[in-house]
Amino acid sequence: MASQAIHKLKVIFSDSVIRNRILFILAAFAAFRVLAAVPIPGVNRVALEQFFNNNQFLGLLNIFSGGGLSSLSIVMLGVGPYITASIIMQLATVIFPKVKAMYTEEGEAGRTKFISLSRVITVPFAILQSVAFLSLLESQGIVIALTPFAFALNVFLVAAGSMLLMWIGELITEFGIGNGVSLIIFAGIVAGLPAGISQLLFTASAANIPAYLGFVFLALLVIFAVVMVSEAERSIPIHYARAMKGISGSPTYLPIRILQAGVMPIIFALSLLLLPQMVLTGLSAVGIAGAAGMLEAFTAFSANPFWHGAVYFGLVVMFTYFYTSITFEPHRVAENLQKSGAFIPGVRPGRETEHYIANVVTRVTLPGAVFLGLVAVIPFIIQGLTGITAILIGGTALLIVVNVVLDLIRKIDAQASLGEY
């Protein structure tokens, strides 16, 4: 095993294509961290720190901003507006047949048009979220009272920062390895680890040490379980009708992973949970009638870990099935098998093969979706039993980091295997 890992590393670093892609990701991370350190004008640091420490909602939102929200940088919104726009476009593929045809049937040109529409929708979301947050921060005294021109300038800076971060994420997807949006969120979480660990060490008391050790053990257990389930797959045997006589080849399989969707269901579910509070917070800050009461009711719902966790679990399971149905198309797989002269033993090629693969994917996705949902709500259960809210943020960040690392390793390994051949 060790010799195989060393050989794989040699292949990765000797392959100029893979090496350049990894270097591009690191350069993009460096650019992102520089942007996250540039604050908007007029920030009251003391008021910001107090407000941030007392608001769990901002702690969760800070995950999507990659740490940019905690310093009120020009990328304080992070990739949140782009994720929201992506969710709307993905839902549109279910509601509108033309959008689904554009995404699935028009090939690369259709996908390019789909992504372009996502970018266009991102712009109004970035502007609305900028207005909402800046109004909230100004009402709390975190940002000094601004003139209309200065307020509009800050809105422009924050919205432009979000669009710039979206562009960097797309560049990572195109010229790097893996999903750029997920990697930006991952980079922000990892960048905040040193500060979080040091704060935990300085504030921890002797009485809390056993609890923190228990949390560390639970985190290691969750990491092990996520790795095992992410690597698990159901292999469907494949035979070829035009096999050469006299040559017995090794058996071929169609692998169906239990977690086809990876980390995206968690990101989508969290985005959908944060969106109502984000909108209501902005409407309340600008004085819309009735928004304050609705915000108070939603805040009370969010403060109940069991109800909030139940909705979170349902959203994770739903988005796991939803994202799997988009990324894995049984019709296309069955069509490709038929074109290559391959078939599943005991199943007729064509429509029956498509139905068989779809049924296998549905059955295999169920335990994966339930597992991902259970792991996602473990921090809510701990919060309900212990009252410690920091574990909620840490648990979500842990899930995202583990899934992104696994996906990145898998894709680098695929690139290395391709280079060997």
Image (tube, helix red, strand yellow):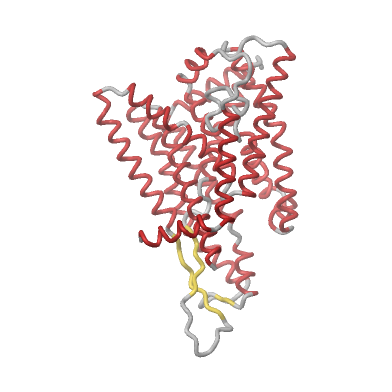
Compared with 2, 24 (above or below) is above
> The C terminus lies in which quarter of the figure?
bottom right
Q: Can you give x and y, in whole percent of width and height, for residue 269 in the image?
A: 53, 39
> The N terminus lies in which quarter of the figure?
bottom left
At x 35%, y 33%, the residue is 382
Q: Nearer the viewer, residue 311 or 75?
A: 75
Q: Nearer the viewer, residue 247 or 227?
A: 247
Q: Can you give x and y, in whole percent of width and height, for residue 323 in the image?
A: 57, 50
Q: Is residue 326 left or right of residue 52?
A: right
Q: Residue furthest bottom?
A: 246
Compared with 30, 413 (above or below) is below
Task: Tell me the quarter of the picture where residue 72 sits.
Answer: top right
Q: Can you give x and y, in whole percent of width and height, for residue 209 in the image?
A: 26, 28
Compared with 114, 381 (above or below) is above
Q: Nearer the viewer, residue 415 or 379?
A: 415
At x 59%, y 27%, the residue is 76
At x 47%, y 25%, the residue is 56
Q: Can you give x and y, in whole percent of width and height, for residue 284 in the image?
A: 62, 18
